[in-house]
Amino acid sequence: MAKYKIAWLEGDGVGKEVMEAAKLVLDAVGLDAEYIKGDVGWEFWKAEGNPLPERTIELLKSTNCCLFGAITSKPKDEAAKELVPELQDKGHVYSSPIVGIRQLLNLHTNMRPCKAFKGNPLNYRDDIDLVVFRENTEGLYAGVEFHPMNPDVMNALLEHHKKMQKFKAVPLDDLALSCRVFTRSACQTIVRDAFEYAKKFQRKSVTVVEKPNVIRETSGLMIREARKIAKEYPGIELWETNVDAMCMWLVKNPQDYDVLVASNMFGDIISDLSAQIVGGLGFASSANMGDDYALFEPTHGSAPKYAGQYKVNPTAMILASKLMLEWLGEIKYAKQVETGVANVIGEGKVRTYDMGGTSSTLDVANEVVKKMG
């Protein structure tokens, strides 16, 4: 019996190809694992009206962790038009399976390392090594939304919130509402995870990225909890910045930052920006971690125009596998994988199209295997 059972969710588009590349690397380090394929993504939405079938949820619950390829998502109305005829107008509403998995399994902490590997022609600069911690289950992604506006909710808001009066005359069909939901416990968890990471890896600062001067209650809650928790880590500085200013400083002086922590939407935004300054989403991996389960993925999309061409850069997926190895405690294997990636990028002989080369997805994976040492 294998030491680990890993859910293998390829998803859509180029997901299959980058997962194939990751498997070459995992097999090369000798991870003792059984990989169990599951159904997820756009094809299952169109055929079944559910991109995350119940059988896949049960599969996840029976495994140690999950590797996830890529997913296609479209707006609600566009998604509904692609259902098979017998499912049309049956009340099916598309929702992202990756967001669903995060919430169903309470994968509350999203960690996105953004490290510039020397030799990457797409780097903003070579001395960037920051990590973004993003709260993963609440905020605007909680899914508490209304359109058309619910009349009971509208009446309650009109009664209890003066600023809603200017919307009183707006027809309910013309009014949409999305709620930014924070809990104290979730704020504490994500901030503490960021500080624990900084402590473990001897990082000097944690920067909390919010907007408390405008979004006073939710961002304010995050900031207040961060200040309390920071007192437990006297050797690590707490920096505070507004999300808009953070975007500017990441472009100007990204090397100044160690660990960033933010709520769900702001974390999504700054992690993509951070990814771009170290080469783009082709180099950006992500860990979605709960108390006893985790899912690892690249942060890029499914790139349907490239599907089947084995053209895209698999580095993000390979680095996601490295994060999985670290989470499993297989530190030696994780270091081998990162060494292979660093060597391939540093030599610059094998490069996919985004780096100005002509190598295939599997060319890169095979070269990483050769250079792992």
Image (cartoon, rainbow, N blue to C red):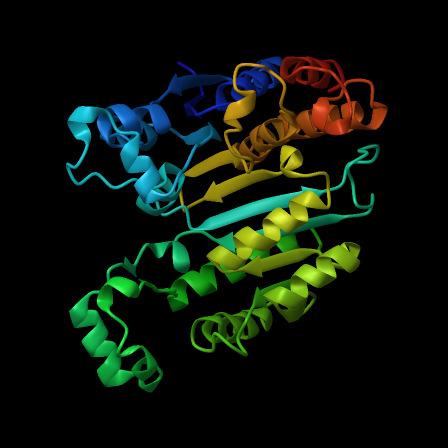
The image shows residue 318 at horizontal and vertical percentages of 61, 26
Q: Residue furthest bottom?
A: 162
The image shows residue 140 at horizontal and vertical percentages of 40, 58
As drawn, is 77 to the left or to the right of 278? left
Looking at the rendered structure, the number of numbered marks drawn on it comes to: 0
The image shows residue 117 at horizontal and vertical percentages of 77, 36
- Relative depth, front residue between 150 and 103: 150
As drawn, is 119 to the left or to the right of 138? right
**Which quadrant of the figure contains the C terminus?**
top right
- Relative depth, front residue between 305 and 258: 305
Q: Who's the residue at 53% across and 62% down the image?
A: 191
The image shows residue 99 at horizontal and vertical percentages of 38, 44
As drawn, is 352 to the left or to the right of 309? right
In the figure, 227 relative to 271: above or below?
below
In the figure, 72 relative to 351: above or below?
below
* Quarter of the image where one finds residue 29: top right
In the figure, 163 relative to 358: above or below?
below
Q: Who's the residue at 26% across and 84% down the image?
A: 160
Q: Who's the residue at 53% across and 51% down the image?
A: 268
Q: Would you say residue 47 is visible in this rendering?
A: yes
- Relative depth, front residue between 187 and 83: 83
**Which quadrant of the figure contains the N terminus?**
top left
As drawn, is 277 to the left or to the right of 270? right
Q: Would you say residue 204 is visible in this rendering?
A: no
* Quarter of the image where one finds residue 64: top left
